[in-house]
Image: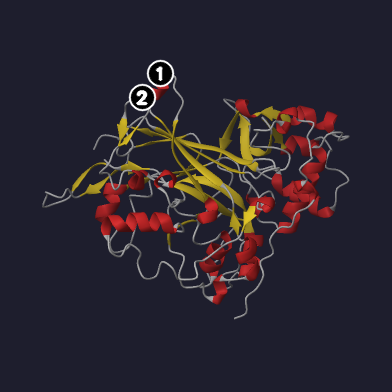
Amino acid sequence: MSIATPSFPAHNATHAIDLRSWVVSANQVDTPFPIQNLPYGIFRRAGSDEAFRAGVAIGDNILDLPAAFASGAFAGFGELTHRAILAAVAGTNLNPLMALDAASWSALRQALSSLLREQSVHQSQLADCLVAQADAEHALPAQIGDYTDFYTSIHHATAVGKLFRPDNPLLPNYKWVPIGYHGRASSIGVSGQQFRRPLGQTKPADADIPVLGPCKRLDYEMEVGIFIGAGNALGEALTMAQAEAHVFGLCLLNDWSARDVQAWEYQPLGPFLAKNFASTISPWIVSLEALAPYRAAWTRDSADPQPLPYLDSAALRDSGAFDVQLEVLLLTPAMRAAGTAPQRLSLANFKESYWSVSQLVAHHTVGGCNLCPGDLLGSGTQSGAGPEAAGSLLELTAGGKQAISLAGGEKRLFLEDGDTIIMRGWAERPGLPRIGFGEVTGTILPARQV
């Protein structure tokens, strides 16, 4: 099999570093949503009975896409833009837009960039189509039909493996195949999700039989979510050259984990109740086109096995990784009561992932699996080489043996009721604007009574 070249989105006028918007907050240095970003989400005014609808983040505001379309501002753009905006305003999720091709997504992005620039003749038409982000609430950006979670951070896999197999932490297949499992789509929620501490079977070390009760070792996992756009037919595979054209964009993902439940149930078929009670994603989906200036070389240590040909390409190695910072913070009830800021737990980078976005898509379909618009892939926990970059408490506490100390004197081995985990992501480089993902937050409620 020959090595093909993925069709990565190229730089264009929407990436120009000197672009400014008539939406003044989009020009602030620290905004996660400059005009070069333009991520999509689903929103409505908080507390209203309005229909949820598509919007685009711009500075501190959201451009209401159905209202913008009704204003006539999109008249005069080409057929691809017209098709894309009709799909974007078709309903209460982004699946119709996701189902289009990459050329249509790019055409809509270019139209939005033009409409929102300084000196746009459409400013007066669109000014009334803005809703403050502070006044909005969000729904899931897509109807997620299927969810697959991968295990792409070798640092995370090694750290966790050492807890159980100190002399041989990685299983023999890890460096050859992107490991994944099919998770539960119905319990995925948008940022702000609150969920009860899960119940499950655990088997204490000193017990002869398992017991049913609340999870005692509740954890988070810092991940990147990958939303599929146009799908592939059953029985057909997407090559590395095709894979990224079928990715609508990236979001942040917290894949909550019940570690004690998982320890008892995972053999021989892998995670089940330990992973199906909640997963939380950020409300905004950042397109691969917006991230084009923040790509990085994808590398594989020469001492490691090199990918099989169907998972390799020259363009992958040149620019197949994404330089995205990933931050995790903890806000405890005591911090909330005292009015203190959440405490950072870790900072990692998605570019260190052992397997890339394109490789996950190509591998998922190589056996003929048909992906569909709105399907979600999780990257697996993203951890760096150092302890300050560990993407879970399982790593930070050495398997629950070494408590982490918080600024106010509190300690944590695992999460407690009332704790809120906050995750943030952004891409930035000197001289370029910050491309942010916003936040994904989730809060743990007490378990229900058995």
Observer-nearest of 23 and 321: 321
C-beta proximity under 8 Å, tags 2 and 1: yes
**Residue that appears at 55% across and 61% down:** 356
The image quadrant of residue 3 is: bottom right
Residue occupied by mark 1: 338
- For residue 238, above or below residue 149: below
Asked if residue 152 is positioned above or below residue 251 in the image, the reply reads below
Q: Residue 129 at x, y = what percent?
A: 75, 31
**Which quadrant of the figure has residue 169?**
bottom left
The foreground one among 304 and 10 is 304
Residue at disc 1, secondary structure: helix
- Rounded to the nearest angstrom, the CA distance separating label 2 from label 1 is 9 Å
Q: Residue at x 68, y 61 (%)?
A: 8
Residue depicted at x 64% and y 60%? 319
Q: Name the image quarter holding the C terminus.
A: top left
Q: How many marks?
A: 2
Q: Report the residue marked by disc 2.
A: 408
Graded by Cα atoms within 10 Å as few (under 14), some (14 to 19) or many (20 or more), the crowding at tag 1 reads few
Which numbered dot is residue 324? Answer: none
Nearer the camera: disc 2 or disc 1: 2
Q: Amino acid at mark 2?
A: Gly
**Residue 210 appears in the rendering:** yes
The kind of residue tagged 1 is Ala
State the image coordinates of residue 89 (x, y, percent, origin top left): 71, 43
Q: Is residue 31 left or right of residue 324?
A: right
Question: Mark 2 or 1 closer to N-term?
Answer: 1
Whole-percent x, y for residue 288 in the image: 65, 53
| Residue 52 shows in this picture | no
Q: Residues within 10 Å of mark 2 (few under 14, many from 20)?
A: few
On the image, the x and y values in percent for residue 282 come to: 54, 41
